[in-house]
Image (cartoon, coloured by chain):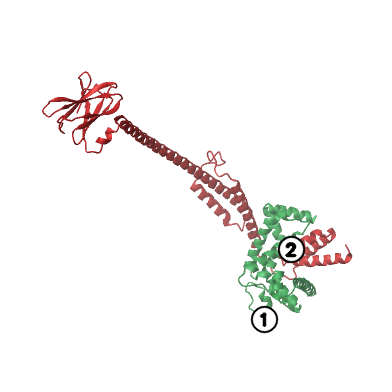
Chain colours: A red, B green
């Protein structure tokens, strides 16, 4: 490096150093000054550092005024408060969201509730009341009070978190229980509907096309039940509106046997209307009633092949 | 030795040590206050700024490197930047206008001490003795808080010219004031 370029760098650095210390440089100029200073030889660096210190200490441009003595305590208090505030923020950042166990196990002497917080706040207020006179005492007392406040606040937050968690779990259990009940009811309903559907289908399959001739055609329906408690079967007679035919449908009659449908007139005369063969538990058969003089008032019976009346209406 | 002492002091300040903060204030409190008072013009505003400056010094204490700057330089850099920020935030710029006014007709601020007025009178005269460009640049940058680039744009002069005018003007004011005060 030539002596002239070194001299230029020294002049530029000196000028920038003076402007830098007076806070007049913007970010770009400040970065340029710092780069030039970093690249300068150690001797020049020391020279610039000394130059800046001399300018900084120079008070010839400043008014001859003195600050009040109280400003010392105000400044000290502000710095200590800022430090305590930073410490609190750090503690809060590191504190767990929730703790498990009693307050004593988590470092507290007892369960601190609202009154404890109020007491700690009062202690803090008392500690800060004469801050300007005794910053050291204020610092200790305030720190202690803040610690108590922090501990109480942490426990309160912890309790709230656990209460909230318990409520959430209870709510979830209740919802699951309700869902199960609804599911069971739905399953029953579906089963019932399915069963009814199967029964209807089975009945239609068993009775065959005759059923359609009687259902919905204004038929007269007569139900028959067992003549004794030992008979667990039943039957239904559907009379066509023209009274010339009947459809007998049975349930739980003994299979592979022949039965007869008997009609009893209003004056008590019994006549066999026809026979039907039972091949399954549920079934139906069409009986021709031509010439039978059946009336809506006629009574009905199902008789087995031994002549025993099993069912009557 | 000084480097080591300043490093130790700032390490203690960084930890929030009360005695260290007191020592820092004893050393630089008056200097910071005078800068603040000169720029802002009232004790109340100056004291607020002093408080902000020392809190800022505490916040940045762990970054202080005594091999790159003396502690007084570090503190004054923070002070000047705080002053400029405060001046920029002001709705009405700045208390420095009293330097432009005739001392005989301007009403003195009640809380301003006599010593300050005497000093400002001398400073005003020294500024008036400077070339117009240097005086204008010093008032805009040093006393009103504008940056070099802003003044360059305001006055429509090259940035290098503004830099030179400020640097030379400040040097001349310092040397003349120092000479006069020593003579006085």
A102 lies left or right of B2: left
A171 lies left or right of B38: left
Structural distance between the alpha carbons of marks 1 and 2:
40 Å
Q: Nearer the viewer, residue B183 or A180?
A: A180
Q: Are marks 1 and 2 on the same chain?
A: no
Q: Nearer the viewer, residue B57 or A48?
A: A48
Image coordinates of residue A131 in percent, x first then y, are 60, 57
Q: Residue at x 85, y 60 (%)?
A: A43
Tell which residue pokes out farthest to the bottom in this image: B105
Binning the other alpha carbons within 10 Å of mark 2 as few (below 14), some (14 to 19) or many (20 upward) gives some
Q: Quadrant of residue B113?
A: bottom right
Binning the other alpha carbons within 10 Å of mark 1 as few (below 14), some (14 to 19) or many (20 upward) gives few
Q: Chain of mark 2?
A: A
Residue behind mark 1: B104
Instruction: Look at the image and tell me whether residue A69 can be seen.
Output: no
Tell which residue pokes out farthest to the right in this image: A2
> Which quadrant of the rendered structure holds the N terminus of chain B?
bottom right
Residue behind mark 2: A30
Q: Residue at x 63, y 64 (%)?
A: B48
SS class, disc 2: helix
Q: Quadrant of residue A231?
A: top left
Q: Nearer the viewer, residue B49 or A282?
A: A282
Image coordinates of residue A255 in percent, x first then y, are 29, 22
- Please report contact status of discs 1 and 2: CB closer than 8 Å, yes or no: no
A186 lies left or right of A108: left
Tell which residue pokes out farthest to the front in this image: A291
Image coordinates of residue A170 in percent, x first then y, are 45, 40
SS class, disc 1: loop
A103 lies left or right of B69: left
């Amino acid at each position: 490096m030539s002596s002239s370029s070194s001299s230029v760098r020294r002049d530029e650095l000196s000028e920038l150093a003076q402007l830098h210390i007076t806070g007049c440089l913007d970010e770009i100029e400040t970065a340029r000054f710092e780069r030039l200073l970093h690249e300068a030889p150690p001797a020049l660096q020391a020279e610039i550092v000394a130059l800046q210190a001399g300018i900084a200490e120079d008070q010839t441009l400043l008014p001859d005024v003195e600050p009040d003595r109280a400003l010392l305590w105000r400044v000290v208090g502000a710095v200590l408060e800022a430090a305590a505030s930073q410490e609190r923020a750090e503690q809060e950042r590191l504190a767990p969201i929730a703790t498990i166990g009693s307050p004593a196990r988590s470092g507290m002497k007892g369960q601190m509730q609202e009154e404890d917080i109020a007491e700690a706040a009062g202690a803090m207020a008392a500690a800060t009341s004469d801050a300007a006179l005794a910053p050291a005492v204020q610092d200790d007392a305030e720190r202690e009070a803040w610690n108590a406040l922090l501990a109480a606040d942490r426990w309160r937050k912890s309790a709230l978190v656990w209460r909230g968690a318990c409520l959430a779990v209870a709510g979830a259990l209740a919802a699951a229980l309700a869902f199960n009940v609804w599911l069971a009811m739905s399953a029953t309903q579906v089963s019932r509907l399915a069963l009814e559907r199967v029964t209807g289908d089975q009945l239609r399959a068993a009775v065959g096309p005759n059923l359609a001739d009687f259902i919905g055609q204004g038929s007269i329906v007569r139900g028959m039940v067992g003549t004794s408690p030992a008979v667990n079967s039943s039957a239904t007679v559907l009379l066509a509106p023209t009274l010339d035919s009947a459809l007998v449908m049975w349930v739980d009659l003994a299979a592979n046997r022949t039965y007869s449908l008997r009609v009893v007139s209003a004056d008590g005369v019994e006549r066999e209307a026809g026979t039907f063969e039972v091949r399954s538990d549920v079934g139906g058969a069409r009986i021709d009633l031509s010439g039978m003089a059946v009336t809506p008032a006629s009574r009905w019976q199902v008789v087995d092949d031994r002549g025993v009346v099993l069912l009557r209406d | 030795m000084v480097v080591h002492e300043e490093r130790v002091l700032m390490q203690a300040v960084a930890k929030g040590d009360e005695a260290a903060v007191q020592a820092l204030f004893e050393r630089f409190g008056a200097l910071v206050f005078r800068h603040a008072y000169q720029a802002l013009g009232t004790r109340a505003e100056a004291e607020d700024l002093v408080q902000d400056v020392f809190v800022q010094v505490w916040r940045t204490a762990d970054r202080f490197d005594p091999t790159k700057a003396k502690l007084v330089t570090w503190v004054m850099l923070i002070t000047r930047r705080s002053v400029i920020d405060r001046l920029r935030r002001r709705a009405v710029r700045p208390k420095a206008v009293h330097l432009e006014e005739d001392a005989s007709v301007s009403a003195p601020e009640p809380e301003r001490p006599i010593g300050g007025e005497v000093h400002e009178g001398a400073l005003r005269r020294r500024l008036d003795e400077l070339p117009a460009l240097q005086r204008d640049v010093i008032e805009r940058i040093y006393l009103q808080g504008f940056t070099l680039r802003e003044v360059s744009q305001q006055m429509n002069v090259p940035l290098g010219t503004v830099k030179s005018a400020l640097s030379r003007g400040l040097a001349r004011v310092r040397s003349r004031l120092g000479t006069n005060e020593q003579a006085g």
